[in-house]
Image (cartoon, rainbow, N blue to C red):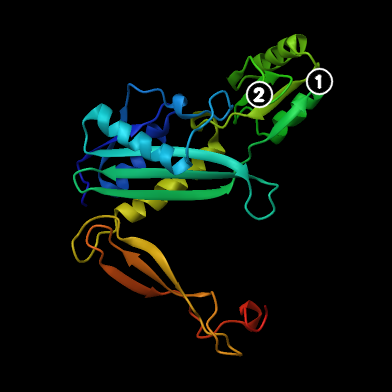
Amino acid sequence: MHYAGKHVSFLTQHGKEALLGSLFTERLGCELIRAVGYDTDQLGTFTRDVNRRGTQLAAARFKAQKAIELSGSSIGLGSEGAFGADPVGGIMPWNTEVLVWIDTSLNIEIVGVAQGPGGGLQRLIADEAALIDFAADADFPTHALVLRPDGPNAHPIRKGLVDWPVLIETFNAMVAESTTGSVFVEVDLRAHVNPTRQQMILRAAENLIQKVASNCPECGIPGFWFKEVVAGLPCGLCRQPTRIPIAKIKLCDACDFRDKEREASEKTADPMRCDHCNP
């Protein structure tokens, strides 16, 4: 294994090194070492008290670069999560996780991604009965909750609530100090208190590890993976090329070696998916 015995610096403050450490050791032979000396909450928080500047990928890349800077290691790992509406219906909470691996000795960057339903529930609540209903929907106390008075951007914020008596006490205190008599309750999306998100991070790590473990057959550099798609499967009726892929291409960023792999098992496409037959 290319990275056997290597130390990988991981900038995180929400327990991700414990979540991913054994996986990276088992699959790549390397050891994740937590980088310290930088508060990643400066880059943005899920409770919106600090907004993220730039893209999700840029934030994960910055963390990997910062990990290298802080530790002196040649390999850095950065992680960034994001939540929004699902890309199909726009209704379901959707979680996307990105992991960036940077190896300065080889001058390579490899990105792992996973996405799916995220369970980021939010609700404005005025009484304990509604709070209990929300907690059940949110799988509390397995998943921590966040409370704040009045609305999604109000202060103060209480994060990481995982105990029933503390939750009720905090809720009643916030009702008393709110201007509307309501409390905004949401699931805490930080990794160390959110098992659903932890599973998505693990999926992103699996995706990353597959890519890191794939070496270029020409130069041996890690990260030889599918990066391009070739469309053009012919329509079964008119024989015109469609947008359905016929192949995907593995590409080495170091030496530009390319390897094409057939994607479609069928020889022709359904005319219903043809822009000429079914515009």
Label drawn at residue 27: none
Horizontal side of 11 relative to 202 (left or right) equals: left
Q: Mark 1 touching mark 2, by CB under 8 A?
A: no
Label drawn at residue 153: 2
User: In terms of image quadrants, where is residue 252?
Assistant: bottom left
> Looking at the image, is 225 positioned above or below residue 176?
below
Is residue 20 something one can see in this rendering?
A: no
Percent coordinates x, y for residue 122 in the rendering = 69, 32
How many tags in the picture? 2
Horizontal side of 180 relative to 262 (left or right) equals: right
The nearer-to-camera label among 1 and 2 is: 2
Q: What element carries label 2?
A: loop
Percent coordinates x, y for residue 108 in the rendering = 27, 49
User: In terms of image quadrants, where is residue 243?
Assistant: bottom right
How packed mark 2 is, by other alpha carbons closer than 10 Å (few <14, some 14-19, many 20 or more), is few
> Looking at the image, is 80 positioned above or below residue 232?
above
Horizontal side of 234 relative to 171 (left or right) equals: left
Q: Residue at x 81, y 20 (%)?
A: 127
The residue labelled by disc 1 is 127
Percent coordinates x, y for residue 157 in the rendering = 62, 17
Three-letter amino acid code of the residue under disc 1: Asp
Percent coordinates x, y for residue 78 in the rendering = 37, 38
Q: Distance between the residues labelled 1 and 2?
A: 20 Å
